Amino acid sequence: MHDIEMNNLYERLLQKKEKLALVGLGYVGMPIAVAFAKKLDVIGFDLNKGKIELYKQGTDPTKEVGDKAISETTVAFTSDENDLDQAKFFIVAVPTPVNHDHTPDLSPVEEASKIVGRHLSKGSVVIFESTVYPGVTEDICVPILEKESGLVCGPDFKIGYSPERINPGDKVHRLETITKIVSGMDDWTLDTVAKVYELVVEAGVHRAQSIKVAEAAKVIENSQRDINIAFMNELSIIFNKMGIDSKAVLEAAGTKWNFLKFYPGLVGGHCIGVDPYYLTYKAEELGYHSQIILSGRRINDDMGKYVAENLVKCLIKADKHVKNARVALLGFTFKENCPDTRNTRVIDIVHELNEYGICPVVTDPVADRAEAKREYGIDFTDLNEIKDMDAVIIAVAHEEFLSLKESDIAALYSDGTSKVLLDIKGLLDRDTYEKAGYCYWRL
């Protein structure tokens, strides 16, 4: 590509003389593709043929933008990587999970780099959105792009990093309304990337000083949340030992203007429960052993076990047999009103209860059933089929559960027996249930 054409990449995208490709169409990538398609020609690529078929049929399995938006979008959905030959501006939005030993699993971002590299042409720009530790874009992705394409980063193609901040299931904080961090390898790239994202991000962009600064900013955002939630979880454990209601304490403390409003809970998903490990991994490589970040992770990773232990204590208190107790788990996804079950910590409660000889029935009206079966071997039971329970755990704050009345919850139990109720998220009014004779417990 001539320098003039490269300099005018932004204009050429606007004129639809060049195309933008989105690589990875999950909870993050798909809303970005749909947003850009309102302004530009967009190719939406994902290796998952089944997912691409759903999108082509106008179905949104992520529930992020809805079926109507998918059926009306002009995104050219494809699972054929050769279609990427037509693109000049690439955005990579693939997951970056952790392995069982909590080390970063960079295979999805490495694989995506290989795919993009195979279809890179002179004058292209590649932007990574996946959460990584500082240095991954330049030290790991660039060599792969160069090797696969035979091109040289700098003279032949440019790279940048713009971390995703989409909050799955959140209809208020969306791509358009969250300030977007952008970065590029040089001034021209930074300017081009900023202008391209400004097309869809109404809240505007923040131009980071460098790619590494942008990578670091992303990884600390979720580490900060993780540490704050860990502090709340630790307080919850302490206050439970003291017989004090944590929610009441937080409501009282929350009246101070600068008290941060975090709440105890299970920390799962692809971000808060994962990103801190990326940061601590890189720190370890450089000879620094994290103190605060890893201790917060330990607390949060143990909360499923803590909930299960308290269920057992409540069953004993209510004179129920622990082994083979009939327990219902309401909610299985990693967060409310979102179908995603990957890295849900509710599974920790299931595994821990299994250790006590309890096989809970699980219901979730929102969750992706096929994914839960594939990832965890869990089959869901419909809520209206659940009855004669000894205990019920409300694990996720889905809207469907918020609307349950005391009579709806009572119908889940055996008649005339004491009812054990664990309300992990503190959705219910404690007094109401204690007066109605429930053995009620919450974080």
Image: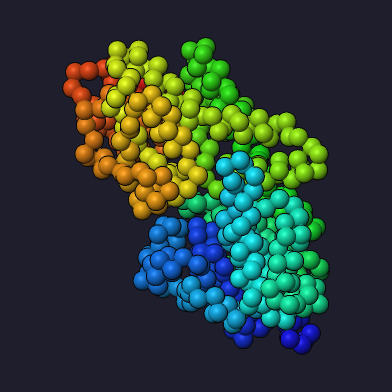
Q: Could you tell me which residue is drawn at 35 percent across and 26 percent down? A: 357
Evaluate whether residue 232 shows in this view: no
Residue 339 image point, x, y percent: 41, 50
**Residue 121, picture quadrant:** bottom right
Residue 165 image point, x, y percent: 60, 54
Which quadrant does the N terminus fall into? bottom right
Residue 71 image point, x, y percent: 39, 71
**Left of 400 or right of it: where is 226?**
right
Q: Could you tell me which residue is drawn at 58 percent across and 24 percent down? A: 234
Is residue 72 placed above or below 138 in the rendered structure?
A: below
Which residue extends farthest left? 415
Give whichever of 245, 155 is nearer the camera: 155
Q: Could you tell me which residue is drawn at 19 percent across and 18 percent down? A: 416
Q: Give the color scheme: rainbow, by chain, secondary structure or one colour.
A: rainbow
**Residue 336, picture quadrant:** top left
Counting the numbered discs, the total is 0
Q: Could you tell me which residue is drawn at 79 percent across and 66 percent down? A: 185
Evaluate whether residue 372 shows in this view: yes
Is residue 264 placed above or below 94 in the rendered structure?
A: above
Residue 48 image point, x, y percent: 46, 65
Is residue 270 placed above or below 260 in the rendered structure?
A: below
